Image (cartoon, rainbow, N blue to C red):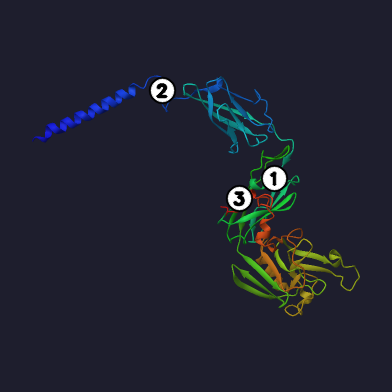
């Protein structure tokens, strides 16, 4: 019975505290600016070095924003182009000037948001847009191969429209070329020459992988008065893991699908003086009929080694003319001896089966031959004959001895892509 008055007393005290708190808040005065206050238009508080009207800004010059008057200052600046790329910049310690520290993109449209503060601490805001002049020289990239389904050994190629020799410029290009794979892989670009790059994973592509390739070079400054242009993206699908191992010593080819042997075929490979190249090759294409002449590989017409033959079910593995094909004239030597001029020959039935089983990008590896090792570049796709650490050295993002700073950049670039 006696508890009721006590409860009423506590409630009264609580109301009194709330009243005092409310009164304290109301006494803050008009000079205070709550965080929820709407920023004023800072158009008269800042100036920009961009041209007026529809004129385009020179992308070779930095963007500068300066505070007017003596009391106001700039507190934050964000500048983004239509591609979503942020323009890096630096604000002076006194807040009087912001200046871009990265190159502007050419032929781009920027949206710039500036936050300010006046002498009383009131927040201001200003948003403006401007365009940059298009590049006089544009570096474009063409990705290969064509969209489709390929074997696990298929490299990605990037052909540049202009040569890029400077290492720093190469690094800009390489950062803008994105390869994404599902499932993820670890991979890297390799500069074959000034105008061509190849990308391959550390190991073969996973069977069934989906691969997308994009270039974010458009408008990007690559070098002195050289900017990137637009590029068409590429999407690939990776098929089963097909590997054919031609053993020049045993005269048999073993064909595997996803690690399991699916066929063992008697073959003949290159005879002495015409030994088949050792190493890993990638299927380049398939031709049902090819006319093969000895003159195409330097054999004089009329010599004892000359030939002119119709060849069927020809699967190409080098640009210089090495194939896996039907060789009905050498069936007696297949599985026994090497009698060809460098190709892997087999019966017509086996060649037809092989032709129907493989696709571009599949692996054909020759072992135990007296031939030289397949070149990494220039005669097809011998990319896989380079050890991974040596392959990585072909990237402009991997540090040389005099540029240790690039090491961290390379580590970031070589993390698995999604």
| Crowding near the residue tagged with mark 3, few <14, some 14–19, many ≥20 C-alpha atoms within 10 Å | few
Find residue 32 and name its label.
2
The reply to whether residue 305 is in sight is: yes
Q: Quadrant of residue 232?
A: top right
Question: For the residue labelled by badge 3, is the local secondary structure a helix, a strand or a loop?
Answer: helix
Front in this rendered view, residue 192 or 269: 192
Residue 374: quadrant of the picture: bottom right
Q: From this view, report whether residue 382 is shown above or below residue 176.
A: below
Q: Earlier in the sequence, mark 3 or mark 2?
A: 2
Location of residue 108 in the rendering, given as x and y in whole percent from the top left corner: 64, 34
Judge the density around disc 1: few (<14), some (14-19), many (≥20) Cα neighbours within 10 Å.
some
Most extreme residue toward the right, as rendered? 302
- Is there any visible trace of residue 282 in the rendered image? no
Q: Which mark is residue 41?
A: none
Q: Secondary structure at mark 2?
A: loop
Residue at 66% across / 42% down in the picture?
217
Question: Is 269 left or right of 95, judged from the image as shown?
Answer: right
Residue 408 numbered tag: 3
The image quadrant where one finds the N terminus is top left
Point out the tag, 2 or 1, that comes first from the N-terminus: 2
Contact between labelled residues 3 and 1, with CB atoms less than 8 Å apart? no
* Residue 359, quarter of picture: bottom right
| Residue wearing tag 1 | 168
Tell me the element at label 1: helix
User: Which callout, 1 or 3, points at the residue further toward the start of the chain?
Assistant: 1
Task: Give x and y (percent) for residue 231.
Answer: 67, 44
Q: Position of residue 211 (x, y in %)?
A: 60, 54
Residue at mark 2 to residue at mark 1: CA–CA distance: 51 Å
CA separation in Å, label 1 and label 3? 15 Å
Residue for point 59% across, 69% down: 259
């Amino acid at each position: 019975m006696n508890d009721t008055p006590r409860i009423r007393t506590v409630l009264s005290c609580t109301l009194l505290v709330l009243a005092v708190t409310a009164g304290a808040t109301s006494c803050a005065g008009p000079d205070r600016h709550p965080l929820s206050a709407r920023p004023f238009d800072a158009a008269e508080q800042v100036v920009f070095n961009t041209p007026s009207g529809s004129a385009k800004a020179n992308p070779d010059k930095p963007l500068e924003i300066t505070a007017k008057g003596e009391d106001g200052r700039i507190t934050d600046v964000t500048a983004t182009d239509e591609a979503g790329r942020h323009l890096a910049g630096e604000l002076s310690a006194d807040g009087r000037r912001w200046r871009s520290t990265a190159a502007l993109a050419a032929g781009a449209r920027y949206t710039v948001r500036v936050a300010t503060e006046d002498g009383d601490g009131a927040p201001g805001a200003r948003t403006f847009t401007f365009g940059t002049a298009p590049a006089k020289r544009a570096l474009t990239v063409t990705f290969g191969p064509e969209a489709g389904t390929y074997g696990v050994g298929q490299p990605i190629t990037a052909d540049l429209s202009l040569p890029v020799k400077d290492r720093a410029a190469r690094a800009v290009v390489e950062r803008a070329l994105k390869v994404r794979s599902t499932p993820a892989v670890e991979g890297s670009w390799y500069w074959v020459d000034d105008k061509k790059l190849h990308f391959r994973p550390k190991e073969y592509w996973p069977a069934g992988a989906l691969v997308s390739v994009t270039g974010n070079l458009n408008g990007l400054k690559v070098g002195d008065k050289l900017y990137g242009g637009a590029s068409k993206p590429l999407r690939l699908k990776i098929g089963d893991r097909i590997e054919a191992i031609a053993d020049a010593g045993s005269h048999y080819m073993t064909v595997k699908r996803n690690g399991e042997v699916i066929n063992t075929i008697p073959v003949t490979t290159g005879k002495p003086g015409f030994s088949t190249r050792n190493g890993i090759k990638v299927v380049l294409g398939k031709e049902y009929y090819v006319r093969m002449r000895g003159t195409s590989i330097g054999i004089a017409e009329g010599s004892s080694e000359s030939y002119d033959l119709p060849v069927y079910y020809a699967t190409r593995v080098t640009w210089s003319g090495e194939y896996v094909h039907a060789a009905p004239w050498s069936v007696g030597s297949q599985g026994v001896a090497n009698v060809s001029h460098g190709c892997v020959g087999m019966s017509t039935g086996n060649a037809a089966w092989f032709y129907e089983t493989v696709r571009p990008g599949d692996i054909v590896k020759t072992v135990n031959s007296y031939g030289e090792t397949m070149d990494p570049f220039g005669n097809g796709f011998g990319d896989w004959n380079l050890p991974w650490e040596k392959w990585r050295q072909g990237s402009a993002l991997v540090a040389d001895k005099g540029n240790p700073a690039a090491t961290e950049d390379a580590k970031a670039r070589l993390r698995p892509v999604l």
